[in-house]
Image (cartoon, helix red, strand yellow):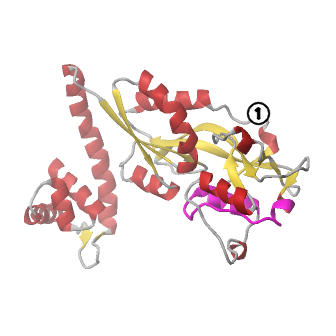
Amino acid sequence: MISIQQMQYLIALSEEQHFQKASKRCFVTQPTLSMQVKKAEEVLGYSIFDRGTNPIELTSFGKELILICREVLHEFDKIDIARQKMTGNYKEHLRLGIIPTISAYLIPQLFPIWKGIMENVQVEIQEMKTSELLESLESKAIDLAILAGPVVNPKWRTIPLFTEEIKAYIPDFKSSQLTTDFLNEQHPWLLNKGNCLRTQMMQFCTISKEMEFDKWNYQGGNIDMLMKMVDLNGGYTLVPANYQLTFDQHKNLHSIYAKSINQSPAREIIALLPKRSTKFDSIELLIRQIQHQYPSVEDSNKFQLLGWE
């Protein structure tokens, strides 16, 4: 059977897709790594990597093997964790990935709370787009993902956090009810491609690809910049209800009503994590604080939950 060290080499090479980069990551020479990969293939009797591609890719057998290697190494790590706990030197390292349209309000509010109640946990937080989060969770580069659902994958555990309304930021709107029909006549200011709120905006407001651009246009990486573009140039953008706004900005935030479905848009915020995790106690504590801080919308029948694909 292949060794733990060989499994580590295989995982590094599968992620780097380059022998030299993988060898540097593993602190060995390139010939050493190449020899160990070849030995692993000889022991198992099948090719793990297709070396005829550039960059190199996993074979069908290799893809299945890497998943098993990650599980084995995950279980193997428990031995070192148990040892550190016995010596009193254990400090958990929790890696959290979160999409920008949630982190913009959630992290400033909850970071000091988490820090106060999780003294023996080092929390590393990274902003990522939804596709990047799913890839990082798959490769075990993060322990927990917070994003807008739905996501269905039998390998992961899904925990609902809260549901929030999506509103329109549109100044000088005086009518009692803002409808999607009215928004269809306004210029939409969109987030960059890859942001799920952009996809949700295009779906609910029926923005076609032809309507995405006019002769002069700007697509922003953050909601604050899009609101400034609305203030200066008119039109509208979508803003999550929990997003932190000034008093003047909040006056320009309006609920949206779609006559065709008799509902307003909302999104479900979820946590994704592996079904087996040595860090579940810390994750659960973190999740409970989120659920306490952000209650879901009161009447769910009034809202249509938006997807992001």
Q: Residue furthest right?
A: 176
Q: Which residues are magenta?
A: 182-205
The residue carrying pointer 1 sits among few (fewer than 14), some (14 to 19) or many (20 or more) residues within 10 Å by Cα, namely: few
Amino acid marked by disc 1? Glu
Query: In the image, residue 122 lies at what x, y percent?
Result: 34, 32
Judge from the rendering whether residue 35 lies leftward or rightward of residue 103; answer left or right: left
**In the foreground, 171 or 297:** 171
Q: Nearer the viewer, residue 123 or 31?
A: 123
Number of marks in the rendered image = 1
Residue lying at 69% horizontally and 35% vertically, measured from the top left: 296
Asked whether residue 128 appears in the rendered view, the answer is: yes
Left or right position of 58 against 179: left
Residue 123 location, quadrant: top left
- Residue 307 seen in the current view: no
User: Is 14 within the magenta?
Assistant: no
Determine whether, in the image, residue 139 is placed left or right of residue 226. Answer: left
Quadrant containing the C terminus is bottom right
Under tag 1, what secondary structure?
Answer: loop
Query: Considering only vertical position in the picture, is 34 above or below 238?
Result: below
Q: Is residue 10 above or below residue 75?
A: below
Identified at 81% across, 41% down, the residue is 301
Write down the residue under mark 1.
298
How far across and how far down the image is residue 233, in percent?
72, 63
Name which residue lies at 65% across and 39% down.
242
Residue 219, percent from left and from top: 60, 65
Residue with the most extreme front position: 232
In the image, 224 versus 282, the foreground residue is: 224
Q: Nearer the viewer, residue 147 or 48?
A: 147
The answer to whether residue 97 is left or right of residue 121 is right
How far across and down, in percent of the image, does residue 182 sit?
Answer: 86, 60
